[in-house]
Amino acid sequence: MNGPSGRITISALVAALAVVALAFVPASLPAGDNFGTSGSAARPIGDLYEGRLAVQEFISSGTEIQALTIQIATYGRHNAGKLYITVQAEVDGQWRTLAKKKFSKRKLIDNEFKEVRFRPALRVKRGQRIALSVRSDKDPSQAITWWMNPEHRAEGMRLTVDGVEQTGSAVFSVAYKRIAGTVGEIRKPLWKRMTVFLRPTGRACVAIAALVALLCFVHLVLWGAAPISSRELP
Amino acid sequence: MKNDGASITGASVQGSVLRDLTIVFALGLGVRLLWAVLTPPWTAPDEPPHFTYVAHLVEQGEIPHESSQETHPEFSEEMLESWQHTFFGRLSRAGGQAKAELAYLPVHHDYRAARRHNRAPELRRTRAAVSATAYPPFYYLFVSGGYSALYERPILSRLYAVRALSGLLGALSACFAYLLAYELRRELRFGRAVGLSMALFPMHVFITASVNNDAAVVLASTILCWLLAKVLLAEALSARLGAAIGMAAGAILMTKPSGVPVALLAGALLLWRAFPIRRSPLQVHTPNLVSLSTFALTFLSTAGAWNVYRFTAHASAEAGADTQEGRALTQFFSPAGHSFLEYLQYEFELGVGYFRRILIGTYWGNFGWLELPLPRSTEYLILASYGLALVGLIILVREQASERRKIALLACLLVFNVLFLFIAADYAFGFASTGAGVGMQGRYFFPTLSCLLCLLCFGLARIFARLRFNAAILPVLVGFVQLISLRLMLSRWYGVHIW
């Protein structure tokens, strides 16, 4: 077993074990295209208080919205009242409410990125129009605001304040629920994702190259690190 | 493995070396092929201009050069369309934007258009090779074989073929790094350790798995470093060794200027061996002189041919004396704008963080268009290993007089490479005229990467001399950083999280 063929056999076995072990490693991949507008060139959308409503519409690129994040500002105050966030989806021309959340304005931090997580994730359809509404109660002295980027324009996005369309988009981001599991469980979508630019022949070549590299690495690690008692002959 | 030094024969050692080289090569090539396909198209530094050079060679049958009569575009229409299909401008910060538009490659997108994109030859033509135009053609001629072989195939197939050939050069570099370490220490484990480390070194893997002439200059420089180790340790030089050094040095000048320091030191070392100071000039050793002569001959014939061609075939009112080298020399000796003293002050004001970013950050791993750095904790780990290795080297040099010359050679190559590039490139090309540097990157210092890896390996092995597998410390460290790099890359470009 100490001959070259024996060593290669052992190396191959260890490499195979490594592949099996890899199958149990946790992994995840995106199921939708997380999206966010940048805060550069941002300005406030205007005061949000009782009776005012800001709505950001966008097109969903995934099927399960896990979190939405908005950048709000408090004008450096601890404001009284509540911040209301509503998520709606357009179904057959009608808006259907998917989630409603409220937060105490007193606990908001000025200019923070307020994340709203949904458990379970909101089920939507890819390509479906989604509306993210933000409103606040109390009088103007307790107003908060939402940052917007007037230079950001993207297909399917529409920002309105009290029904009046604004130029640009609100500063927000969408995070879709990921496909999670072990490498072994999600190996097919994982492999497909990592080789999007390859044709089947290319994918096969890469798989073989990776396995050969692993085998060589294992072989060198197993048999290459031990010293020989005296210096070898030149 | 039997620890029986007496039973080892020269033939079996040679057999072991050849086997090791095969394994190191296969590993290096396998890792590079993986990176070649995982790195999204065009998202490696300067890949578009380098690929344009290759395409220009094949499509238009000439070495690209600036010509006032050329009407073709800078980048081919085929490539520009491929950028759209592969989201290059939106995925990467190559355009200089503060933040990339896309978090990762879109999930729900049909990539068939990108995979199949292929345009007629007239839409593949270019004016020259953009920023790569001035480079010598050695590397591009080699990798153009991949482009030609898949000429009828889509552009991405051609790109991957060229990347694969580039990766082959990178894998060969690892083999010569093995030989360098083995030449110096005469122990297989050190050869394996350094070869394995170079095969897995993250930034080297990334760059050589893309279309970039760094792959060729690093190979030529590593070969030259190995040959210089032979020069240092040989009792007498041979004509064959001189010729080999001449060819390697000439090859460096035929690929990229970043290897020039190694070529210069090669000439200096040969001169020193041929005319040692302690000897009388009348006692010059004839074989060494022959070696020096063959070096000069092969060097001039290798590098000279290209430069003669360049200055005659492409001579024009613009190209005549206004070459990159000419400008650099003019700036250095009679700076039009800023003195060298101002440059030193400027560098001092940039602080330690600047040098850390260049010599550690972009050296070990900053992927994409320098937009995907390794985690700071990994950099600290690398710095700690540098510190330990330095202590180990000091102990080694104090303990073993026989190792001093070898360590000195490696250190000289490394330090001279760094200093030369800062002075000749950053100052002469950049600061002297503009008051700002050219934007140094770690990969510019890759010609002496094998020397650094040898120093690290030897130093760490000495510090941990009591451990049986002390030579394995460096490859374990490099392998660990390689895994982190792969994970980082998959996360950024594909949104895939592993572990």
Image: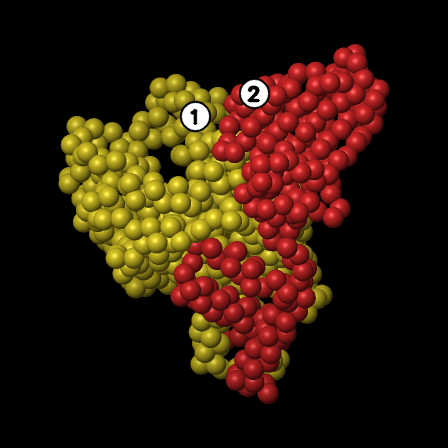
Q: Measuring 44% from the left and 22% from the top, which residue is drawn there? A: B435
The alpha-carbon separation of the residues under discs 2 and 1 comes to: 47 Å
Tell me: B383 left or right of A107.
Answer: left
Q: Secondary structure at mark 2?
A: strand
Residue at 19%, 47% (x, y): give it: B60
Q: Quadrant of residue A219?
A: bottom right
Chain B colour as displayed = yellow
Query: Along the horizontal axis of the image, is A56 left or right of B109?
Result: right
Give x and y (percent) for residue A170.
61, 26
Give amino acid for label 1: Phe
The percent coordinates of residue A111 (x first, y second) are 71, 24
Question: Who is closer to the viewer here, B286 or B188?
Answer: B188
2 and 1 marks in contact (CB < 8 Å): no
Secondary structure at badge 1 equals helix
User: Viewer-proximal residue, A215 or B109?
Assistant: B109
Asked whether the viewer can see residue B11, the reply is yes
Which chain is painted in red?
A
Residue count near mark 2 (Cα–Cα under 10 Å), binned few <14, some 14–19, many ≥20: some
Quadrant position of the N terminus of chain B in the picture = bottom right
Residue drawn at x 52%, y 69% is: A211
Q: Which mark is residue A166?
A: 2
Residue A182 point in image, percent of width and height: 66, 62
Structure colour scheme: by chain
Q: Residues within 10 Å of mark 1 (few under 14, many from 20)?
A: many
Give residue B431's mark. Answer: 1
User: Observer-nearest residue: B155 or A163?
Assistant: A163
Residue at the spot x=38%, y=30% of the render? B429
Which subunit holds the residue at mark 1? B
Kind of residue indicated by mark 2 = Gln
Numbered circles on residues, count: 2
Up/down of B231 relative to A160, above or below? below
